[in-house]
Amino acid sequence: MMRRKISRFVLAGLVLVGGILPLETSAAPADEAAFLNSLEGRWTGGGTVLLRIDRGPINVSCNFSSDATGTALAMRGTCRGLLVVSRSISADLRTDGARYTGIYVGPRGGRSALSGSRSGNAINLTVTWAREVNGDRKATLVVQKRGENGMRLSTVDVDPATGKRVVTSELNLRRS
């Protein structure tokens, strides 16, 4: 059960909000490869994760490595929380024109689907979890470039008890 909960925060580590941006594209398809290339490198940082919507946040620290090849981006990382819990995660994104698709693989190996588009400096993705999380299988993931050497990964889910959108993770990373 803890591994399943940790896998949610790990995606959030990829994941990840100053606000959810509209799911529209403002970039020409030729710009997508350049944008993905700007996300390449080694990233470190941390933030908070909710293991469950009805619980308090946990502080985490993360390390990621991302490689861009043309219109594809591969991210591999590890996030640590609760002093001793460490989980490996990965995400692979690909763009075909203005549309982004991909796969997130959490610590248990479940493959969750990613799809969306870019608006400005943010890739806005719908996550379709491999299994039910917080009462459904959908969430939102935003990968946002912040300046030359910053990236924010955040996830937002809907609280099944209230119907309100809740930031379930927010990681602020710096290129190292």
Image (cartoon, helix red, strand yellow):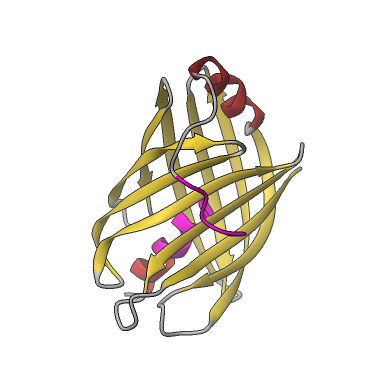
Is 94 above or below relative to 113?
above
Q: Residue at x 46, y 85 (%)?
A: 55
Asked if residue 39 is among those painted magenta in the image, a careful observer would answer no
Give how far across and how far down residue 137 sits, in percent: 25, 60
- 62 relative position to 3: left or right: right
Q: Nearer the viewer, residue 18 or 1?
A: 18
Q: Nearer the viewer, residue 84 or 117?
A: 117
Q: Residue at x 32, y 57 (%)?
A: 108
Is 97 above or below relative to 21?
above
Counting every numbered tag in the picture gives 0
Give how far across and how far down residue 100 sits, in percent: 40, 32
Q: In the image, which residues are magenta? A: 8-22
Residue 107 can be seen, yes or no = no
**Quadrant position of residue 84:** bottom right
Give how far across and how far down residue 32 sits, in percent: 53, 23
Q: Residue at x 39, y 66 (%)?
A: 157
Q: Residue at x 49, y 33 (%)?
A: 74
